[in-house]
Image (cartoon, rainbow, N blue to C red):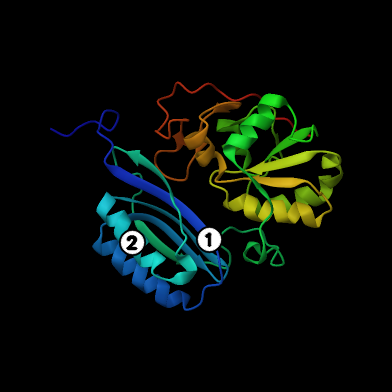
């Protein structure tokens, strides 16, 4: 008898990771990875672009380890370090390997994280700042959710700011219009796994916002290392699990709703 998804023993390994690094021969990469993932019965999405790689995969432990070994065999990708979670069922319907112009679309080609990323704050350090109500120097903080509005509404840090954007390409115009709002504050940007903040924090520096950090590893790494301290609700993920709780398991519907978003 088939075990219902809600009670199935977690056996599917879910990983996500990215790296901003110059990649060439994208069609070759696409063919090799598509063939390997099909042979390993992996499902998910791999995005390839001249600026790097972004992937979400799910399958058996052996299959995940095999594809990661292939990626890490390239010296440019040797330090890939995926975030992991477990599920009782496969959360993806198919396997896609796509070539894109950007692995996360900002439409600001001058923003290149490969050339130097913005300062990052660890989950543990961010929790200490939130506990204290200020950063290490006593400066007031603002948390900026760089995700789309519907993601923020499913869960986020208490009292964070968001721009109510529908897609990440709207983030740059919003920052340009509201850069003055962040003067005199330490700003910590965050997103699901960190990739959007790699560009968001650099963009904000370019608009003269001096003290901008990105949350290392995003919300999922915060859940892994800190739990739900100062966080309300769940975290939306782009697969059939939809929303994860702070235990990195699919929400069972008991997650408390987030506070109403602020529109500062």
The quarter holding residue 72 reads bottom left
Most foreground residue, 187 or 1: 187
Secondary structure category for the residue under label 1:
strand
Q: Position of residue 108 (x, y in %)?
A: 70, 63
The quarter holding residue 78 reads bottom left
Work out whether residue 168 can be spotted: yes
Most foreground residue, 149 or 63: 63
Please tell me which residue is depicted at 35% across the width and 44% down the height of the picture: 91
Please tell me which residue is depicted at 55% across the width and 39% down the height of the picture: 219
Q: Residues within 10 Å of mark 1 (few under 14, many from 20)?
A: many
Q: Position of residue 58 (x, y in %)?
A: 34, 50
Q: Farthest residue to the left: give it.
A: 1
Q: Disc 1 to disc 2, how far (Cα)?
A: 16 Å
Q: Position of residue 133 (x, y in %)?
A: 73, 26
Which of the numbered marks, if any, corresponds to residue 251? none
Image side of residue 176 versus residue 252, left or right: right
Image side of residue 245 versus residue 92, left or right: right
Which of the numbered marks, if any, corresponds to residue 19? 1
Most foreground residue, 100 or 57: 57
Please tell me which residue is depicted at 42% across the width and 29% down the height of the picture: 251
Q: Position of residue 204 (x, y in %)?
A: 76, 52
Work out whether residue 99 can be spotted: no
Which of the numbered marks, if any, corresponds to residue 67? 2
Secondary structure category for the residue under label 2:
helix
């Amino acid at each position: 008898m088939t075990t219902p998804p809600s009670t199935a023993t977690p056996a599917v390994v879910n990983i996500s990771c990215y790296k901003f690094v110059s990649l060439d021969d994208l069609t070759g990469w696409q063919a090799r990875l598509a063939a390997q993932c099909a042979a390993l019965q992996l499902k998910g999405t791999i995005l390839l672009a001249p600026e790097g790689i972004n992937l979400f995969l799910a399958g058996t432990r052996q299959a995940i380890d095999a594809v990661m070994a292939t990626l890490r065999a390239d010296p440019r990708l040797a330090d890939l370090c995926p975030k992991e979670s477990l599920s009782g069922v496969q959360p993806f319907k198919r396997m896609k390997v796509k070539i894109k112009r950007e692995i996360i679309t900002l439409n600001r080609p001058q923003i290149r994280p490969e050339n130097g990323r913005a300062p990052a704050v660890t989950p543990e350090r961010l929790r200490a700042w939130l506990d204290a109500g200020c950063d290490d120097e006593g400066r007031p903080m603002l948390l900026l959710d760089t995700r789309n509005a519907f993601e923020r509404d499913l869960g986020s840090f208490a009292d964070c700011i968001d721009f109510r954007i529908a897609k990440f390409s709207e983030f740059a115009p919003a920052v340009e219009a509201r850069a003055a709002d962040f003067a005199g504050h330490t700003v910590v940007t965050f997103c699901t796994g960190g990739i959007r903040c790699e560009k968001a924090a650099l963009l904000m520096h370019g608009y003269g916002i001096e003290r901008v950090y990105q949350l290392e590893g995003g919300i999922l790494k915060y859940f892994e290392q800190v739990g739900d301290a100062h966080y309300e609700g769940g975290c939306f993920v782009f697969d059939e699990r939809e929303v994860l709780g702070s235990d990195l398991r699919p929400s069972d519907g008991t997650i408390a709703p987030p506070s109403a978003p602020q529109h500062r």
